[in-house]
Amino acid sequence: MGNSLLIGLSRQTALQRELDVVANNIANVNTTGFKADGAVFAEYLNPRASSDQFTARDRRMSFVQDSMSWHDMSQGTVQQTGGPLDVAIDG
């Protein structure tokens, strides 16, 4: 039973991390020059379950693993402001 709780906990931790990234992106969407973040998750397969309570043979267990975070470094849109001293760099 402990293994099933750990699997559920790994998913809940991943969901919390994903929610943090999305909340940060939404909070800063109108900030000038803000670069969005993203999170990448992967499946981690444990070779066997490790508990003495299993009556059948051990099975592989699948956990969620937070692999990495990334920043979107693509260029934003260039907007005309009408100001005589405003400049924009393309590229």
Image: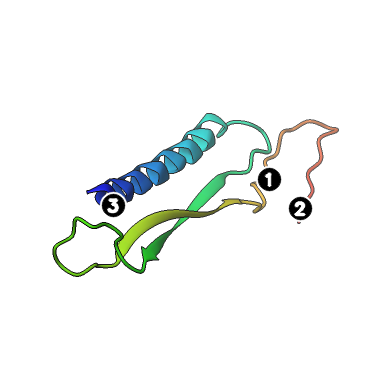
Image depth: mark 3 or mark 2 in front: 3
Residue 50 pos. (x, y %)? 31, 60
Residue occupying the point 32% across, 61% down: 62
Looking at the rendered structure, the secondary structure element under dot 2 is: loop
Image depth: mark 3 or mark 1 in front: 3
Residue 11 pos. (x, y %)? 35, 48
Q: Is residue 83 above or below residue 57?
A: above
Mark 3 → mark 2, Cα distance in angstroms:
53 Å
Left or right: 10 with respect to 76?
Answer: left
Left or right: 86 with respect to 70?
Answer: right
Mark 2 → mark 1, Cα distance in angstroms:
8 Å
For disc 2, the neighbor class at 10 Å (few under 14, some 14 to 19, many from 20) is few
Left or right: 85 with respect to 71?
Answer: right
User: What residue did someone put label 1 on?
Assistant: 78
Label 3 or label 1, whichever comes before in sequence order: 3
Residue 54 pos. (x, y %)? 18, 60
Q: Amino acid at mark 1?
A: Val
Q: Nearer the viewer, residue 14 or 51?
A: 51
User: What residue did someone put label 3 on?
Assistant: 3
Q: Nearer the viewer, residue 85 or 5?
A: 5
Q: Which mark is residue 90?
A: 2
User: Quarter of the image containing the C terminus?
Assistant: bottom right
